[in-house]
């Protein structure tokens, strides 16, 4: 089958020949009958042929461009498939049928992560309202394993008045669901972004959880905390809170600096209850690991913390008696 450009050239040659013939016939008939209308009619026919040729030429150009795009897409898909095939081949290279995964290899780690997530999601499922859409954990939000740890503490703590959360979002909804299940306590959520806070508030309202949560919009400001100049939530002080039994720190965003979340304990330590838990998210990053170490090493308003449990991406510090 000829390509589009070849077909277009043949069409142009045939159209040109046809126009010449029509024009000659028009001139001859005009001369024979002494009427210029024959010449005008021939010119109109030639004009129609020209329009058809130009339209076909534009269509040919579009088809050629589409064909090139399809070819490039196919080539890119082939390269991606080859890369994936190489990756899986490398992962399975040398493994006999039925041979178990070697501990610590990439596929083994992926298997473990999937097992943890599936187990955690199964634990979260009883909290989900039937037929209602609940924000999915993971990604930028707290992981399923971290949410299970928070919810387990909320449901099993002997006494619980208040959960404070720095940074609202998916975790706000899940903590509120846990408090609803417990039948007591409330969540105070701090959020610096008013638009994001509005999204969280809408999710809480939709799920009938607005009465459990006090969502405070607190813009970030420069302030002095424990002798350091830091950026943290404006107007947030320990006197503004009742007894805090769980403090979940998932904000401000880490991109604001390596110590963006460090002020949480120095500012709110005085409000922590006698058996309070402090949970810091994103400890897979070196900055948060340094914050955990600083909290555990220091004394804040007479409060000392010791490292406790941990999840795949969060660390727990427990108030010492």
Image: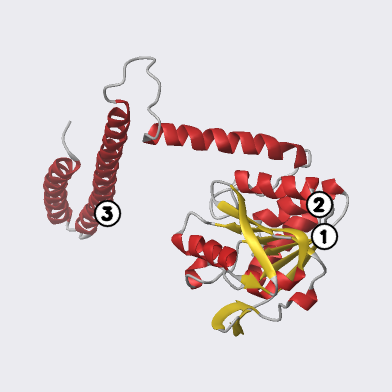
Q: Say whether disc 1 or disc 3 marks the residue closer to the N-terminus.
A: 3
Work out whether residue 207 or residue 143 is closer to the camera in this orientation and state it. 143
- Residue 265 seen by the camera: yes
Q: Is residue 33 left or right of residue 135?
A: left
Q: Residues within 10 Å of mark 1 (few under 14, many from 20)?
A: some
Is residue 311 left or right of 20 when viewed as pictured?
right
Q: Position of residue 226 (x, y in %)?
A: 60, 81
Residue 179: mark: 2
Give the residue drawn at x 25%, y 56%.
44
Disc marking residue 186? 1
Please rate how many residues cluster around mark 2, counting C-alpha atoms within 10 Å: few if below 14, some from 14 to 19, many from 20.
Answer: many
Q: Is residue 94 above or below residue 66?
A: above
Q: Earlier in the sequence, mark 1 or mark 2?
A: 2
From the viewer's perspective, is the residue at label 1 or at label 3 nearer? 1
The dot on residue 51 is 3
> Residue 57 bears which disc, if any?
none
Determine crowd level at label 3: few under 14, some 14-19, many 20+ residues with C-alpha closer than 10 A: few
Quadrant containing the N terminus is top left
Instruction: Point out residue 266 in the picture as x, y percentages from the top left corner.
Output: 64, 74
Q: Is residue 267 left or right of residue 111?
A: right
Along the viewing direction, whichever of 215 and 302 lies nearer the viewer: 302
Label 1 sits on a secondary structure element that is: strand
Give the mark nearest the N terminus, 3 or 2: 3
Q: Secondary structure at mark 3?
A: helix
């Amino acid at each position: 089958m000829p390509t589009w450009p070849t077909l277009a050239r043949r069409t142009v040659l045939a159209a040109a020949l046809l126009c010449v013939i029509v024009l000659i016939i028009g001139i001859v008939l005009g001369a024979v009958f002494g009427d210029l209308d024959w010449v005008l009619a021939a010119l109109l026919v030639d004009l129609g042929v020209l329009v058809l040729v130009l339209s076909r030429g534009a269509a040919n150009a579009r088809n050629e461009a589409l064909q090139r795009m399809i070819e490039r897409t196919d080539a890119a898909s082939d390269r991606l498939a080859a890369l994936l095939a190489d990756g899986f081949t490398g992962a399975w290279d040398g493994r006999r049928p039925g041979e178990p995964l070697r501990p610590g290899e990439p596929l083994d780690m992926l298997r473990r992560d999937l097992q943890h997530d599936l187990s955690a999601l199964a634990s979260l499922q009883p909290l989900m309202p039937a037929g209602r859409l609940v924000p999915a954990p993971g990604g930028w939000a707290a992981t399923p394993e971290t949410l299970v740890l928070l919810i387990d503490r909320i449901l099993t703590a002997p006494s619980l008045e208040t959960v404070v959360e720095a940074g609202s979002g998916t975790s706000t909804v899940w903590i509120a669901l846990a408090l609803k299940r417990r039948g007591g306590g409330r969540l105070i959520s701090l959020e610096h972004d008013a638009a994001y806070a509005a999204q969280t508030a809408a999710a809480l309202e939709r799920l009938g959880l607005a009465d459990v949560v006090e969502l405070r919009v607190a813009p970030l400001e420069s302030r002095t905390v424990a002798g350091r100049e830091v950026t943290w939530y404006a107007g947030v002080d320990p006197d503004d809170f009742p007894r805090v039994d769980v403090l979940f720190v998932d904000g401000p965003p880490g991109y604001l600096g390596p110590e963006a979340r460090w002020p949480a304990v120095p500012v709110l330590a005085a409000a922590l209850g006698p058996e309070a838990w402090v949970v810091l998210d994103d400890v897979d990053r070196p900055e948060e690991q340094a914050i955990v170490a600083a909290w555990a090493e220091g004394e804040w308003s007479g409060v000392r913390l010791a490292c406790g449990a941990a999840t795949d991406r969060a660390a727990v510090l427990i108030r010492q008696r």
